[in-house]
Amino acid sequence: MKKEAKIKKVKKSKKNKGFKEISNRSGYKFFMPWLIGFIIFTAFPFIYTIYLSFSSVRLTVLGWETTFNGIANYVTALLRNTSYTPALVQFFLAEVIYVPVIITVALILAILMNGDFKFRTLFRVIYFLPVIVISGSVMTQLMSTGSVQIGNVRGVFIFQILESYSPILADLVIFLFNNFAIVLWFSGIPIVLFLNGLQKINTQLFEAAQIDGATGWQILWKITLPIIRPIILVSTIFTIVQLGMFPINPVYGMIQNAIFDTVAGLGLASAYAWIYSFLVLILLGVAFLLLKDHSKDYAYVDVVRLQNEKLEKMRKRVRRQQEWNAFFRKQKGVKHGKH
């Protein structure tokens, strides 16, 4: 009997293994067209730019002429070109200013729109509609005409107080007010991501925290933000990359112009692109280090376990309260019976 059971178990495992292999093959076949396109149109050009960045590429009568020149393109980009390094600094400062503001505004709006109120769906559509309607070219035209600026806030009394306290902070506030439409435009996708994460949080956690006497601010910092931390990281990475592809990034325009330069050629443009990519990778690394969970036992299973422990404590507390209420009602009935 044991041998028959063992044989059946082996046959079943082989059958499951064969089914998995067939499923994997089908998945790879479905995935293959995208993989081929990625290798030809993305991976190969991406790797080829490394070779071009160390070469002098010129357009001649006979075609493209490529000559290896070492790090000359990188030296030209960083030391000889008077526009590229300031453009890198401007892009870095824009990322440092825009990304925290965009993520903070998107998180606040997502928390507000996650509440239960009338016309909630309409407000969600209003905040996400500019992402669909306003394309990059339309936004560029609005920026060039000054239509995205809220107005001159230097005459506001509160701003004058802020300027007297810190001129640097006042200039930062002016910059954000003048570009607040851009902040709202880039907040569309993060709002959707945050709403998705907020709706998946177990509401019983909030109820348990409120029973323990936690305030709304404590619930936000102790429950909401730790649970949606991975979504904050994903939204930050998405925003950093998206800002890099937007016209507010001067480096992006310089790379495009250098491609069509017949003197410097594709070699200098490739060096521009790799220096810019290295800066973006540094920003992504910093975002990952700041937003990743530093606790050693962070895992989905641990989060679920903690949630279940809190829910069990809440159930015990409610059950104990019900027992005490039943005891007091019984005592009260006994007293009334004696009378």
Image (tube, rainbow, N blue to C red):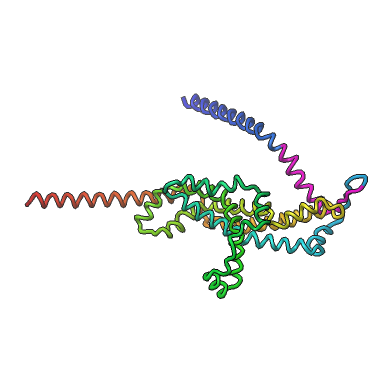
Residue 218 x/y as whole percent: 43, 59
> Which residue sits furthest right?
61
Residue furthest toward the left?
339
Helix, strand or loop: magenta stretch: helix
Q: Quadrant of residue 155?
A: bottom right
- x 81%, y 61%: residue: 75
| Rendering coords of residue 58 (x, y %) | 88, 51
**Residue 148 found in image quarter:** bottom right
Q: Quadrant of residue 62?
A: top right
59 horizontally vs 211: left or right:
right
Q: Residue at x 54, y 54 (%)?
A: 106
Q: Position of residue 56 (x, y in %)?
A: 86, 53
In the image, 14 versus 190, the foreground residue is 190
Is 57 within the magenta? yes
Relative height, residue 173 to residue 199 (above, below): below
- Total residue callouts: 0
Q: Does the magenta-highlighted stretch encompass residue 251?
A: no
When the figure is inspected, residue 113 is found, relative to residue 26, above or below; the finding is below
Residue 70 % position (x, y): 84, 57
The residue at 68%/49% (across/down) is 137
- Determine the residue positioned at 13% across, 49% down: 333
Residues in magenta, as a range: 36-60
Give 128 or 49, whichever is nearer the viewer. Answer: 128
In terms of depth relative to the viewer, which is nearer, 319 or 191? 191
Query: Could you tell whether 109 is left or right of 137 in the image?
Result: left
Residue 98 vs residue 6: left or right?
right
